[in-house]
Image (cartoon, rainbow, N blue to C red):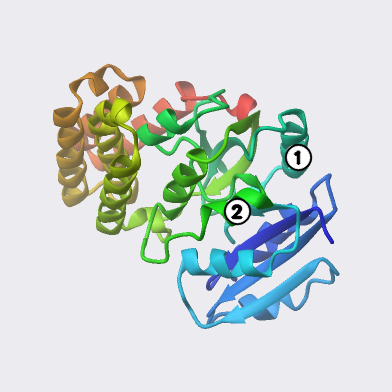
Amino acid sequence: MPCVSVIVPAYNAEKTILETIKSIQAQTFSDFELIVINDGSSDRTIELLNTINDPRLKVFSYENGGLPIARNRGIQRATGEFITFIDADDLWKPNKLEAQLKALQAYPEAGVVYSWTAFIDENSNFLYAWEPLHWQGNIYPKLLIRNFISSGSNILIRRQFVQAVGEFDPNLKSVEDWDYYLRLAALCPFAVVPEYHILYRRSTQSMTSKIEVMENANLTVIERAFKAAPPELQYLKNQSLANAYRYLAKQCLFNGSDRQGVQQAQRKLLKAIQLSPKILLNRETLRLVLKLLTVKFLPQGTARRFIQFLGKNFPMVSVSKAN
């Protein structure tokens, strides 16, 4: 029986699947099974997977069910003591599994461990890094405010908590990972590995480009989470909603800097400020306001160059820290 089960949901992933698998095979910890759930792919995903010679690799094909269902199917196939997930377009640094396992061994009360996330583009070039956070133990109040774990390619979970928390919600078309993390955080402490292990791929074809789908899913998860949260945490709801709308504003700008995208981003950001005015004091919000004004009032080429200059010279986290 392997120590870790690595679950990879894959749907039409021919452009990235081999790179993702290579990043898993390159792990310094090697006692794992690699479960790929082919979620009804119609491209060359299966053909490419068949070129991989690795006894740890197990491929299971189903009709398309969507990401949450694919992860649930992977869980049903998993035999490891620990379970982790990585999407078919994301990457891991080589010591991800080893470092996370050590963190759980050092903190036996924790049921889940997460690392930090950096973002890459469609060509695997570094974009920026998520801010370094050191929250561990009872992270439930922090996680209610926003999904700082950032993606579904991050956590490592002890099997007993996978069994206790239940499945990913198959009805959610986005942020199903945040919903899952919230339910886990209500059950057990989390540990953190203060290193950038997750390389999350940003693409205009990814789920994060579907703004309306994301908005509806965020509102569903927030309403559900605060319905379950204790009375003393209800005051966090507006802050949670504000963070969600700020994130949606960022996606609007990322996916389109035309007039429609700018207007959409402006509406989402205004909604965030109305919900929680103090969000304007946040550095992330100020950067977003600056980008929005740049795109709105400067020619497109000039705006793009200025935003690139801003990201390169005044990043949220420096490239050296994320590499």
x and y percentages locating residue 211 in the rendered image = 28, 54
In which quadrant of the rendered image does the N terminus lie? bottom right
Which residue occupies the foreground of this view, 203 or 7? 7
**Image-based side of 26 in relation to 242, left or right:** right
Residue at image point 54% right, 47% down: 200
Q: Residue at x 48, y 78 (%)?
A: 64
First in sequence: mark 1 vs mark 2? 1
Secondary structure beneath disc 2? helix
| Above-or-below relation of 226 to 12 | above
In the image: residue 75, left or right of residue 310:
right
Label 1, secondary structure: give it: helix
- Above or below for 208 versus 285: below
Numbered mark located on residue 21 in the image: none
3D distance between C-alphas at marks 1 and 2? 16 Å
In the visual, does 74 lie left or right of 67? right
Q: Is residue 238 above or below residue 181?
A: above
Residue 267: percent from the left, percent from the top? 14, 41
Q: Which residue carries the number 2 mark?
A: 162
Q: Residue 36, how many percent across, how many down?
A: 66, 69
Please name the residue that numbered disc 1 is placed on: 101
- What amino acid type should be assigned to the residue bearing mark 1? Leu
Identify whether 275 is placed above or below 215: above
Q: Is residue 86 visible?
A: no
Q: Residue furthest top?
A: 281
The mark closer to the camera, 1 or 2, is: 2
Q: Residue at x 71, y 60 (%)?
A: 21
The residue depicted at 15 percent of the width and 44 percent of the height is 263
The x and y percentages for residue 260 are 16, 51
Which amino acid, by three-letter code, is at mark 2? Val
- Asked whether the viewer can see residue 28, the reply is yes
